[in-house]
Amino acid sequence: MGQLIQFNNYTPVGDLTVIATCMVVAVLLATSYVTRTRTFRLFLNMLIYLALAALTDVVMHDFYTHITDGRYTAIYVLKIIYHILLFSLLLLYIVYFVVVLQLDRKTRRPLMVLATVIYMIVLINDIVSTIRKSGFRLDGSGEAVSAFNIFVIGYVSLLSILGYLMVKYRNRVYKKALYGVIGTAAVSLLILFNQAKHEQSSFTVVSFMFPMIALMYLLHSSPYDIKTGTINASAFSDAVSYNYLKKRTFYLINLYLPGYSSEGKPLPKDLEAVIRAFPSRHFKKTVLFHIGNGDMLLMISAKANPDCEEKMQDVINDFFKEYEIFNVDYKLIIGKSIDEISARNEYLSFIKDMRRNMPLNSLHIVSEKDVTLFNKSEVIIKELEDINRKQDIEDERVLVYCQPVFNIMTGKYDTAEALMRLELPGLGMVYPDQFISLAEEYDYIHMLTKIILHKTCMSIKDLTDNGYDVKRISVNVSMPELRDEGFTDDIEGIINASKIPSGKIAIEITESQTESDFLLVKKMIDRLKGAGIKFYLDDFGTGYSNMERIMKLPFDIIKFDRSLVLACQSDSRSQEIVGRLASMFADLDYSVLYEGVEDEADEKRCISMSASYLQGYKYSKPVPIDELKNFFCKTA
Ligand code: C2E
Ligand code: CA
Ligand code: CA
């Protein structure tokens, strides 16, 4: 005979606890942020099955206490439903793991077929044996279970499939998440064991609940990103404060892969696997944080890795080995915890600050100098914010310097480029490389442009009123500010207010990297060109030039970047290419301007390469705009 479990030896405490817990979880999920992935929807189904199973169990036992005439059909039906729910739950666990482990069709199929067959056998047996009265039956005194307990065998087999999956594919899930699930599953088995010992059945559903709560915590609402084994940025905050509190040193490795985002382009699967495995390949006690799109930060305990610094070169070599394989754009920053930087936000801004000044696909090792620069950036941001808030077009912190441009045709200086400087309290003169990208990132750049344009217009007015021959002065504008709706109105408004002819102003803009940027530039040029403003294509030769796009825009002057002038110094082949490009532009009625002409040799070479204008230290460094008087001639 099979074991006899007293049907009336039941207390609803376990099941009611399950129902209550499901409700709590539902409330938590409704009020917290959870990404609605496929596995998460599976999880929600599991939650519903769990609550229903507990409810069925409670109702079934409640009915039982109310039935006095010995007609137990309703109980039998409920018992079958109860079993269906429990086994479906087990089946869902398996499906869940199959999805999370990303098993391919070939491995998935036989497992799912096997699980479904077991599921069907158990449930059919349940129904048939109940109808034939050979299995579960009630006679008012207790419950009889068939001698050959298929229910238990089925239960154990499905659990074995789960166990097999977890062991076989353990490398596909983040280790700690796996341990969490196995740990809670062990607790559940302990409950089942104790329940059997006491001839109980009240806590069966409870045993299904714990691994599920573990799954939810670890894989959904939790900070773990199962694919890369990363933890959400908010956890970084705690880690930083904890280490500072304990005065513990740590190392940080930041890997930024700009091409990827969780919403847009996800990381390739095999790259995810490498990221997941990389930290433990080299270090003990590491935590990998996910601090932004394609942005990962590895924290390494110095105590657990006293040889960290010596090892770093191996890590870097290993990184480059992987880079050879994946070849995706990156920025890599390596550093140690710094006393002056003690909060998560500061670390994140510090990283961003260094990254701003790094070329793509480069490695940067943090130094003292970075901290100084970072502190400076923080001050600059505050000042820029203040400039932007005050909206004072005469703001004295924004200075206009000008670099005169030599006109080959006339042999005179009659144009110039306006270049911005900031004069900030405590910092003195600040140069563009320290604030332009910040201003662009924080959306303050348009205010700066307005100030520069206004001051330039005023100077042009002053110069021409004093009889100087100023053909035009060019002002730089940044791509991000073109997205501002009022951009063209602002530009026209400022020029008109100064009462100088619009033709005395030119705008320099770099090549657009995307089609949408190109369309924005085109719209802007089409409108402002009508007012007589001239357009310069800045920094030609620094990006991936798209000739078709360039030709579609009515530029007046193409500014050949200093890097091209430099390349021509030593290399006759570069000279050949640059010369041909310049002559092609000249043939198409563009004027060619060379930037960064530093000496006579540069000058001679550029003149031989279809130059119309020359700009560089050979003629003058940028000077305060008032000093342009020293370069421009008086009209006769
Ligand atoms: P850019 O537009 O290419 O400006 C030319 C830069 O090259 C200037 O640096 C100038 O001082 C420098 N330069 C000129 N001649 C020579 C030379 O012979 N040799 C060398 N090595 N360098 C030379 P600056 O003023 O530091 O400006 C750097 C960049 O900052 C500018 O590059 C421009 O992209 C940006 N910038 C400057 N002012 C503004 C502005 O008002 N608005 C915007 N949006 N960007 C600006
Ligand atoms: Ca420029
Ligand atoms: Ca330039």
Image: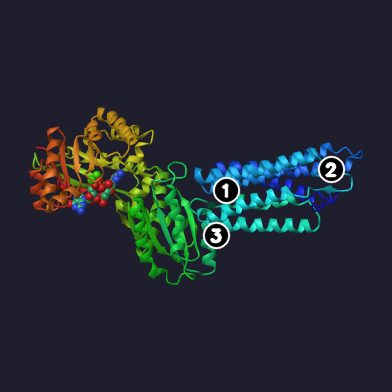
Mark 1 to mark 3: distance in Å? 30 Å
Instruction: Note whether 277 is above or below 497 in the view shown.
Output: below
What residue is disc 3 on?
Answer: 238
Question: Is there CB contact under 8 Å for labels 1 and 3?
Answer: no
Question: Is there CB contact under 8 Å for labels 2 and 3?
Answer: no
| Percent position of residue 375, x then y | 40, 59
Residue 97 shows which numbered tag?
Answer: 1
Figure quadrant of residue 41: top right
- Mark nearest the camera among 1 and 3 is 1
What's the residue at 32%, 38% (across, down)? 514
| Percent position of residue 579, x then y | 11, 43
Instruction: Judge left or right: residue 14 versus residue 283.
Output: right
Figure quadrant of residue 537: top left
Please say whether residue 36 is visible from this viewpoint: no
Badge 1 or badge 3: first in the primary sequence = 1
Amino acid type at circle 2 is Asp
**Depth order, front residue of 457/437:** 437
Instruction: Judge left or right: residue 136 versus residue 152.
Output: right
Badge 2 or badge 3: first in the primary sequence = 2
| Percent position of residue 339, x then y | 45, 66
Instruction: Judge left or right: residue 47 versus residue 589.
Output: right
**Depth order, front residue of 127/540:** 127
